[in-house]
Image (cartoon, grey):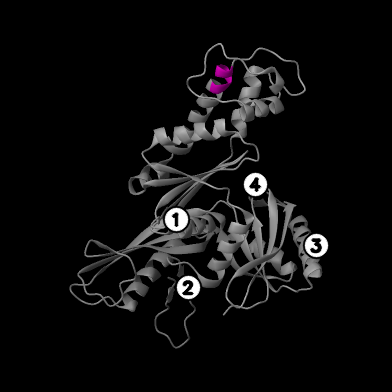
């Protein structure tokens, strides 16, 4: 049974700090008690550039939350979006020659893999470790195969790392707020876990997220986060192009896109309706022109995201599904549909529309991950002083 004391979560994304407070009741049902969205201070483009500004902003808002809820928090769970993570996939092997797989065999493999990674990436810190694949005698095994007999065992790990100095700065900031960081979760991991839990038999997939000014693609394989890539452009670049070429105001372009039916069969003589012009003089603009500008730009953007993406081209061989999330407050179905068509044409994956990932989705999933772990995440456990072998992964959550 979980504690009834509320937990504090803070998401740090591209634009905001999101403060979230939630509680597990005696039946482990989760309830959101408080949420607050505040513009970023002291952090820009995933770089902490002003420690004092960041610290003061966080400290003031945490204090206000504690006063409003009549609580005192001692620890915080962080959800980080981006922060320039590094993804590394490594495999280790063990010749068994007909013997049984022992925990010590797996410990040895994991020890070697993690040690080699730490030696190679001296300026990085491991954030997440996933047991992404177990193979015994060339056969894939779903669970940790301790106790099974075989000749050859292969164990693949997927690591997520962040810059060690970023982690030191985050710890420093929250130390000044009198908070201990209980756990750090990468936002893509949280979203991937949510999608896996809510889509039966879907453990391997891509997720594409299109926002106004940013875009992202990440890949989950066997319930393990394998890579994430962020782009500093979103669908707003398409709207700006239309505005520039047609000399229309951005508000007018948005209004046209929201209130006009577009498709490949638009007549060349069809004009944008006069009532769709917002705060500017009406001019004869062909619907087909706007549609062709948008289509060409979307296809260019999708090519950058997929065709020229080494990671995507490597991993697409093992995935059949792509979840597509289009985050717009406006109902611009034209742009959304163009993205869908372009994604479908550039690969053979099944495109599934995904509802916007809400703050509530984030908090509920992050709560489960921080309290109960993840079925494929390997959790390092400190060993007693008397132990001869340091067991990095004594707990595999399932």
Residue 165 in view in this figure = no
Of the pair 218 and 259, the residue shown nearer to us: 259
Disc on the earlier residue, 1 or 4: 4
Dot 3 crowding, Cα within 10 Å, few <14, some 14–19, many 20+: few
Q: In the image, what residue occupies the spot 68% across and 62% down?
A: 20
The answer to whether 250 appears left or right of 341 in the picture is right
Dot 1 crowding, Cα within 10 Å, few <14, some 14–19, many 20+: few
- Helix, strand or loop at disc 2? loop
Disc nearest the viewer among 1 and 3: 1
Which residue, given by chain and number where applicable, does mark 2 sit on? 380
Which residue, given by chain and number where applicable, does mark 1 sit on? 199
The image position of residue 220, as x and y in percent, is 43, 54
The image position of residue 84, as x and y in percent, is 56, 51
The correct choice, above or below, for 183 with respect to 287 in the image is below
Disc on the earlier residue, 3 or 4: 4
Label 1 with label 3: CB-CB less than 8 Å: no
Which residue, given by chain and number where applicable, does mark 3 sit on? 60
The correct choice, above or below, for 32 with respect to 359 in the image is below
Disc nearest the viewer among 2 and 3: 3
Q: Which residues are magenta?
A: 287-291
């Amino acid at each position: 049974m979980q504690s009834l004391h509320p937990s504090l979560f803070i998401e740090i994304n591209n634009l905001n700090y999101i403060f979230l407070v939630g509680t597990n009741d005696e039946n482990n049902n989760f309830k959101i008690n408080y949420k607050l969205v505040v513009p970023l201070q002291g952090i820009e483009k995933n770089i902490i550039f002003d420690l004092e500004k960041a610290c003061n902003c966080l400290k003031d808002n945490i204090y206000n939350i504690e006063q409003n809820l009549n609580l005192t928090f001692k620890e915080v769970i962080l959800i980080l979006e981006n922060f320039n993570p590094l993804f590394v996939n490594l495999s280790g092997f063990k010749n068994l020659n007909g013997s049984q797989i022992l925990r010590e065999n797996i410990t040895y493999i994991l020890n070697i893999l993690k040690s080699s990674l730490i030696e190679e990436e001296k300026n990085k810190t491991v954030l997440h470790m996933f047991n992404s694949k177990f193979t015994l005698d060339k056969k894939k095994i779903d669970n940790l195969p301790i106790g099974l007999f075989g000749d050859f065992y292969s164990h693949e790990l997927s690591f997520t790392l962040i810059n060690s100095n970023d982690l030191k700065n985050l710890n420093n900031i929250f130390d000044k707020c009198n908070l201990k960081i209980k756990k750090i979760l990468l936002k893509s991991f949280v979203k991937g876990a949510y999608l896996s839990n809510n889509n039966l038999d879907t453990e391997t997939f891509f997720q594409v997220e299109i926002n106004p000014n940013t875009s992202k693609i990440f890949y989950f394989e066997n319930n393990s986060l394998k890579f994430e890539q962020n782009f500093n452009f979103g669908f707003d670049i398409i709207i700006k192009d239309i505005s520039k070429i047609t000399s229309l105001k951005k508000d007018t372009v948005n209004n046209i896109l929201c209130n006009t039916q577009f498709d490949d069969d638009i007549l060349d003589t069809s004009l944008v309706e006069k009532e769709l012009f917002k705060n500017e003089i009406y001019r004869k603009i062909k619907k087909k022109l706007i549609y062709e500008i948008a289509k060409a730009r979307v296809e260019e953007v999708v090519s950058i995201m997929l065709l020229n993406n080494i990671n995507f081209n490597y991993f697409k061989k093992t995935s059949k599904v792509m979840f597509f999330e289009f985050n717009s407050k406006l109902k611009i179905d034209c742009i959304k549909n163009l993205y869908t068509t372009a994604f479908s044409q550039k690969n053979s994956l099944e495109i599934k529309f995904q509802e916007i990932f809400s703050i509530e989705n984030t908090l509920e999933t992050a709560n489960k991950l921080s309290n109960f772990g993840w079925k494929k995440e390997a959790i390092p456990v400190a060993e007693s002083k008397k132990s001869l072998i340091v067991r990095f992964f004594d707990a595999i959550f399932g």
